[in-house]
Image: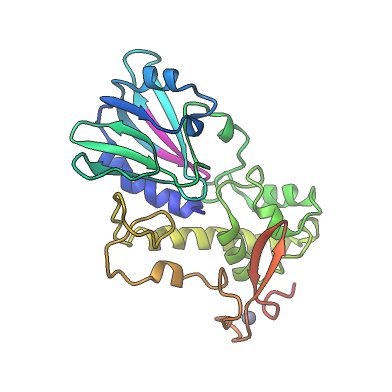
Amino acid sequence: MPELPEIEVLARHLRPLLRGKIIRGVDVRRAKVLSPTAPRQFRRILLGAKFTGLSRRGKYLLFQLHSQSVAPTVTLLGHLGMTGRMFLARKNVRQPKHAAVVLDLGGENFIYEDTRYFGRLTLDMTAIQKLGPEPLSDNFQPAKFREALKRSRQAIKIKLLDQKLVAGIGNIYASEALFRARLSPRLAANRLTVAQVKRLWRAMRGVLAEAIACGSTVPLNFGAGKTDGLFYFGRAPGTPDFYAERLRVYDRAGKSCPNCRRPIKRIVQAARSTFYCPHCQRA
Ligand SMILES: [Zn+2]
């Protein structure tokens, strides 16, 4: 599932491609992904609207549009769920079987494809209203972070997935940040010392910033029917798999820890896999 860095890379990729494009047709094939926005309302508001900007909040994409018909500015919220992809494709390219929404932009289509339909493309903003701070912003400070952790007895790995605590961290970067901070994923959130919180805070920002930098160098090859090596990203054929290789513990159970060479372990916490090194992450 894509997390903050993958969505940031996608936003940077799509932003210049979408800017100035006008929506000439709206084809909703899976009304579920618009929920709770009704397809009729979705069509009425988006038809004729022009893409003016694209930003990210947590794991969400925020498409800014200028609309003449309704409110002057409209925000469209996108979430990729487990398997969603959003990309532009020329009109003569055959559309994917699981296209959920297709926006006609003239020479190209904007396609939201989702084989499992867990993602969203909606005018409803409820999902982002309760999000915690952006981990790479100045709003995310160690002191406030520690205060929030103090209120929870949950294992720190589980707590990091709470989007109200901090936005955009998922299963991959929670494991990676804890490894970098040398903290056990089982440690109760309220038991972290000041020094440990500071270390975790720095580790989270480090793994996210590095993932964005790394993802920004991957040649993206979006399109219908393309292979999906980089989560939902299509990639140019022959590109080495360095994006997955950069992960130190995630999905590496049994492989050797890059620090101590002992095997990485997989455990299950709140029904999700956690990967860590029991030797390096003893605190
Ligand atoms: Zn180790």
Q: Quadrant of the C terminus?
A: bottom right
Q: Residue 129 appears at what percent x and percent y?
A: 59, 32
Task: Please determine whether, in this image, residue 184 is positioned above or below residue 260.
Answer: above
Q: Residue 142 appears at what percent x and percent y?
A: 65, 53
Left or right: residue 169 compared with residue 272: left
Q: Residue 230 appears at what percent x and percent y?
A: 40, 60
Left or right: residue 265 compared with residue 120: right
Q: Quadrant of residue 272?
A: bottom right
**Which residue appears farthest toward the top when viewing the image?**
69
Colouring of the image: rainbow
Of residues 71 and 40, the one nearer the viewer is: 40
**Ligand 1 sits in quadrant:** bottom right
**Which residue appears farthest toward the bottom when viewing the image?**
261
Number of numbered discs on residues: 0
Left or right: residue 201 compared with residue 221: right
Task: Please determine whether, in this image, residue 173 is positioned above or below residue 83.
Answer: below
Left or right: residue 240 compared with residue 208: left
Task: Please determine whether, in this image, residue 115 is positioned above or below residue 189.
Answer: above
Q: Is residue 63 magenta?
A: yes
Point out the stretch of residues depicted in magenta: 55-64
Residue occupying image coordinates x 79% and y 55% = 190
**Which residue appears farthest toward the front when viewing the image?**
97
Residue occupying image coordinates x 72% and y 69% = 184
Q: Quadrant of residue 36?
A: top right
Q: Does the magenta stretch include residue 166?
A: no
Q: Residue 141 appears at what percent x and percent y?
A: 62, 49
Residue occupying image coordinates x 40% and y 43% = 98
Q: Quadrant of residue 255?
A: bottom right
Residue occupying image coordinates x 41% and y 23% = 74
Magenta segment's dominant SS is: strand
Task: Please determine whether, in this image, residue 129 is positioned above or below residue 195.
Answer: above
